[in-house]
Image (tube, rainbow, N blue to C red):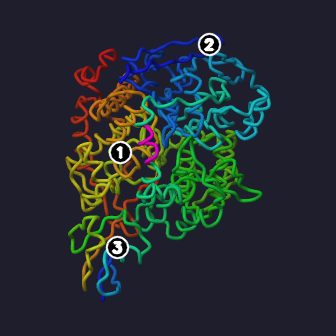
């Protein structure tokens, strides 16, 4: 199915969770995830399943040092 | 519980060649319990803030804290306090390694260096035995050679050395002090003051570190590090890729300062100089500080070119010698880092000053005649490396640039002052206020110039409410989250001020900000209270600790006020308020009117006078600083 990820179209598997999407993107869980402008709690990353045309924004807090 | 310990202070007068000791009673030490708080307190007893930075009247003060050397991660930091020759304000810089632990192990919370030696010397401290030794034979040596020579001179290996390189000896305005040849008290030109005093090194004999007051309770905290590291992806990432793990991300998001902040993304070079690339190519080892499990320090090697003795680049260094200068060659960046550690130069100010010079050259304000034929264009890594050496030795164009980019800009004239990217004379670290407006506010108001490690960073407020970051930040009163980091509102100003107070506490207690902090770090506000209780029997609270931090900031601000600084000095360069020119953040703009209003609100939150921007008498009294009135 297709979703919008950070303003670009992306094809992902059906019934993919947020956690699985992060793993596919090689990202860790210390990111913020918004689906259709609603922020998802971290404890819900495993159980929130993505659906067709979800508008997903993943924000990675960049710190440097 | 026990009474707060007294502070033991060693005083070394280089003019008179005299050594003495004094004590600060525990009930006073508790108000200024170490680090730069103790440093500023002692500085104010010793000098008039109007004195010249490069004068015998400006002391150089090394301070640790009541907690330093307890055996767990993040407790080995030393702060150097002095009047900064780069900014003219109070000067402050921190370093890690093993020197802090052994300074404390010798029984000293603070070492005050006064006056000026007639000839080059170094000081050796072995508890009550303090020697001022001739350094004529090592003056002029780079740090690695000097370290070897000192060990040979003392015939000892079990020592730790805090030293300057030729940069400090030659009074480069952003010279630093290094221990282990790669742990820098970097910013503000503290090494310049040391060089002015003809002091090559402060050497301490290795001693046993202190043990915890309540060992059982302390052990629960110290042994939790392993589990916390396993669960904390941010800190674990530091161990893997170092602080430079985010550089490519900054460029992709469009917030990487590039070509002297004229642009904001570096697609042609970012990937080459990021932490992951270092890990895959030149990384030889991950080093650490006393008792620390994080192992964030990089050690790189390029045979025949870069010696692992000099460590490896952090994010700031990779940015300032990388994207700031348009250089996308990792070997050039690593060599630049090495040269700074050999010669004793702050990598942020050095890289930023060369980037400034590159912009001047590209725009015709500096010519081949000025540079001695060096083509100082963005992207010319070889030129960048050549100029570092010229700065350290004050030769050719280095003589101009050794003053720092603000003074260099004033001397060049024309449009050059517009190309200085910093505050109060100190060049910006690589965090853009357009992305992190609270950091930008602190850049503006921070007493010792633009500094990225004086407050928490805005992006962590975007994390989910149930994340460790947000749970911890809520403990210091910041409950609101944001969908984007760019917002400026009242809560953001409160966040800037309150997190600044918290970080000020960290720099007072000499805690490493990668282990201890208000959000993403291994240990948060609650654990700091536990640390004080179990570590030294200090029954404290977040309230008292935040007050300690606020007190430090106000002491520094009042020092500056007495030195002649006002809110007129709290300004960001015009370029910061222009729309982002390129990349994913193109068009995003920091609203200048909103920003200035935020700064005015900050003064109110801080209890500072609206006209001068300086602490009011009431605020000083509130913080037990009536002696500064």
**Residue where numbered disc 2 is placed:** B19
Across and down, in percent, residue B579 comes to 34, 61
Q: Are marks 2 and 1 on the same chain?
A: yes
Front label number (2 vs 3): 3
- The residue segment tinted magenta is B218-224
- The disc at residue A19 is 3
- Tell me the CA gap for discs 2 and 3: 62 Å
Tag shown at residue B524: 1
Residue B441 visible in this rendered orientation of the protein: yes
Q: Where residue B321 sits: x, y (%)?
A: 57, 55
Say if B123 sits above or below B72 in the image.
above
- In the rendered structure, the residue with mark 1 lies on which chain? B
* Residue at image point 24% right, 73% down: A35
In this image, B308 relative to B272: left or right? right
The residues tagged by marks 1 and 3 sit, at their Cα atoms, a distance apart of: 26 Å
Secondary structure of residue under mark 2: strand
């Amino acid at each position: 199915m297709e979703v919008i990820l950070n303003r670009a179209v992306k094809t992902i598997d059906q019934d993919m969770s947020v956690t699985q999407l992060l793993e596919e993107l090689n990202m860790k869980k210390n990111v913020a995830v918004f689906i259709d402008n609603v922020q998802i709690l971290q404890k819900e990353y495993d159980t929130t399943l993505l659906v067709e045309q979800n508008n997903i924004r993943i924000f990675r807090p960049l710190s440097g040092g | 519980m026990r009474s707060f310990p007294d502070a033991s202070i060693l005083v070394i007068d280089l003019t008179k060649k005299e050594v003495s000791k004094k004590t600060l009673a525990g009930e006073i030490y508790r108000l200024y319990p170490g680090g730069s708080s103790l440093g500023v307190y002692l500085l104010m007893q010793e000098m008039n803030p109007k004195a010249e930075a490069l004068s015998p009247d400006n002391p150089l003060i090394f301070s640790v804290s009541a907690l330093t050397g307890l055996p767990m991660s993040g407790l080995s930091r030393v702060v150097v306090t002095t009047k900064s020759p780069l900014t003219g304000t109070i000067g402050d810089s921190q370093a890690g390694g093993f020197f802090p632990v052994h300074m404390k192990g010798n029984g000293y919370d603070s070492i005050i260096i006064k006056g000026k030696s007639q000839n080059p010397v170094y000081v050796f401290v072995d508890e009550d035995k303090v020697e001022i030794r001739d350094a004529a034979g090592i003056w002029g040596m780079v740090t690695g050679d000097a370290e070897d020579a000192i060990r040979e001179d003392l015939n000892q290996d079990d020592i730790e050395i805090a030293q300057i390189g030729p940069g400090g000896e030659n009074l480069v305005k952003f010279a630093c002090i290094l221990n282990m040849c790669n742990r820098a008290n970097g910013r503000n030109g503290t090494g310049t003051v040391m060089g002015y005093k003809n002091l090559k090194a402060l050497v301490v004999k290795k001693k046993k570190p202190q043990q915890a007051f309540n060992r059982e309770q302390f052990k629960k905290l110290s042994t939790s590090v392993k589990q916390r590291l396993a669960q904390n992806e941010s800190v674990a990432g530091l161990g893997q890729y170092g602080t430079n793990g985010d550089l490519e991300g900054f460029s992709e998001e469009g917030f990487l300062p590039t070509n002297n902040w004229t642009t904001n993304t570096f697609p042609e070079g970012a990937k080459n100089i990021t932490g992951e690339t270092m890990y895959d190519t030149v990384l030889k080892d991950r080093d650490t500080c006393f008792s620390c499990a994080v192992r964030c320090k990089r050690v790189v090697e390029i045979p025949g070119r870069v010696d692992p003795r000099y460590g490896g680049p952090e994010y700031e260094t990779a940015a300032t010698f990388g994207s700031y200068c348009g250089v996308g060659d990792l070997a050039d960046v690593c060599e630049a880092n090495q040269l700074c550690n050999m010669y004793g130069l702050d990598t942020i100010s050095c890289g930023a000053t060369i980037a400034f010079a590159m912009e001047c050259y590209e725009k015709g304000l500096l010519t081949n005649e000025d540079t001695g034929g060096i083509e100082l264009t963005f992207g010319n890594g070889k030129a960048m490396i050549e100029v570092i050496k010229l700065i350290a030795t004050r030769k050719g164009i280095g003589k101009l640039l050794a003053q720092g980019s603000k003074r260099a800009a004033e001397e060049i004239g024309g449009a050059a002052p517009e190309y200085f990217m910093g505050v109060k004379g100190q060049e910006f670290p690589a965090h853009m206020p357009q992305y992190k407006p609270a950091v930008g506010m602190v850049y503006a108001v921070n007493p010792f110039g633009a500094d990225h490690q004086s407050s928490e960073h805005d992006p962590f407020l975007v994390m989910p409410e149930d994340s460790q970051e947000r749970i911890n930040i809520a403990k210091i009163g910041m409950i609101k989250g944001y969908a984007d980091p760019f917002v400026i509102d009242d809560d953001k100003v409160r966040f800037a001020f309150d997190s600044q107070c918290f970080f000020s506490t960290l720099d007072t207690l000499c805690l490493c900000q990668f282990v201890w902090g208000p959000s993403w770090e291994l240990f948060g506000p609650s654990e700091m209270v536990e640390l004080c209780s179990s570590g030294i029997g200090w029954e404290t609270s977040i309230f008292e600790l935040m007050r300690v931090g606020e007190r430090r900031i106000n002491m520094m601000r009042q020092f500056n006020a007495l030195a002649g600084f006002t809110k007129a000095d709290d300004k960001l360069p015009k370029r910061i308020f222009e729309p982002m020119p390129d990349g994913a953040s193109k068009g995003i703009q920091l609203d200048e009117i909103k920003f200035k209003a935020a700064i005015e609100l900050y003064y109110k939150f801080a209890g500072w006078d609206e006209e001068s921007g300086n602490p009011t008498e009431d605020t000083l009294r509130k913080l037990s600083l009536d002696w500064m009135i």
